[in-house]
Amino acid sequence: MAAQSGPVSAPNFGARPRPRMRVRLVRFARSKPLGALGACLLLVTVSVVLLGDLLARYPSEQVFSQAPLHPPSAEFWFGTDNLARDIYSRIVYGSRISLFVGFSVVASGSLLGAALGIVSAYLGGKADLVIQRVVDGMMAIPGLFLALAIMSALGQSLANVIIALAITQIPGTSRTIRSVALSVKEMQYVEAGRAMGATPWRIMWQHVAINCVPPFIIVASASLGSAILAEASLSFLGVGAPGNIPSWGGMLGGDNRRYMVQAPWMAIFPGFALSLTVYGINLLGDALRDILDPRLRGSQ
């Protein structure tokens, strides 16, 4: 056979480089425009939290004695409240409370609920029966009523708000993750782990738990929005964050309600910030559900 002439091209093994992060973000924005909008809204809120000291025009508790119930103006962008405090600055500082409570509740209550659901599903038998009956009892009480009862027992403080809301997140997360873990524990790789002599705890956390991460992300995104709303509800009822801590719910409740007809900006701007943040989280959560849920992935 005659020898081939010409330059020899490098072998192509069909290796396809992974798309860069920017390309992935563009694809996500094109396929899930509402999810991208939600991510942008959440990013704005996070930026306000991180840059609050630079964005706020005045300290949250600074009183302008000559300007109570001052309407929005060049000096006071969102007006002032009945105590002559700048509403814009209080909204900026109040964003820290909302996101701090939301992420703390997800990091504690949702994680604990997920762990409880995995243990309940894997152990089965009497352990599963006892755990689920406790979960049923917690789910029988509306979440806000349960949080109010816990707050009345523990007292009013930011730490107690997180504890109360974290407890209300446990049953729903536990029930959802348990349903996923029940199917995962019947997979062949779990049976292989048992045959190789792996301990139940090793299988539970290294095989079952890792496959419950996508549904947990979906549940956590929904829990984040509900936790922010629940904190605002508790503050609105006067049992949430202490009065010296600015919070969006606190700005909508308490004595402020008596002045909202006279000064509607006291309700419009805090309510708009709260609604926009929760709306963005819900949009992002819906997009993550569509991407991570295998039942919806094939229909896209």
Image: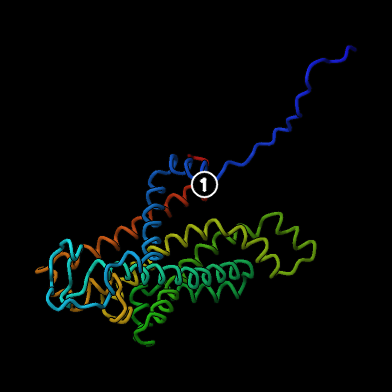
Q: Does residue 116 lie above or below 158 as drawn?
A: above
Q: Quadrant of the N terminus?
A: top right
Identified at 17% across, 64% down, the residue is 265
Counting from the top left corner in percent of width and height, residue 60 is at 28, 74
Asked if 295 appears above or below 143 in the picture, the reply is above
Q: Amino acid at mark 1?
A: Arg
Residue pointed to by mark 1: 295
Q: Position of residue 150 (x, y in %)?
A: 38, 82
Residue at point 35% right, 82% down?
149
Quick check: 114 left or right of 39? right
Residue 187: where, in percent of width, then height? 67, 55
Which colouring convention does the figure follow?
rainbow
Q: Of residues 235 and 15, which is closer to you in this image?
A: 15
The residue lying at 48 percent from left, 45 percent from top is 25
The percent coordinates of residue 161 (x first, y second) are 38, 78
Q: Residue at x 37, y 49 (%)?
A: 37
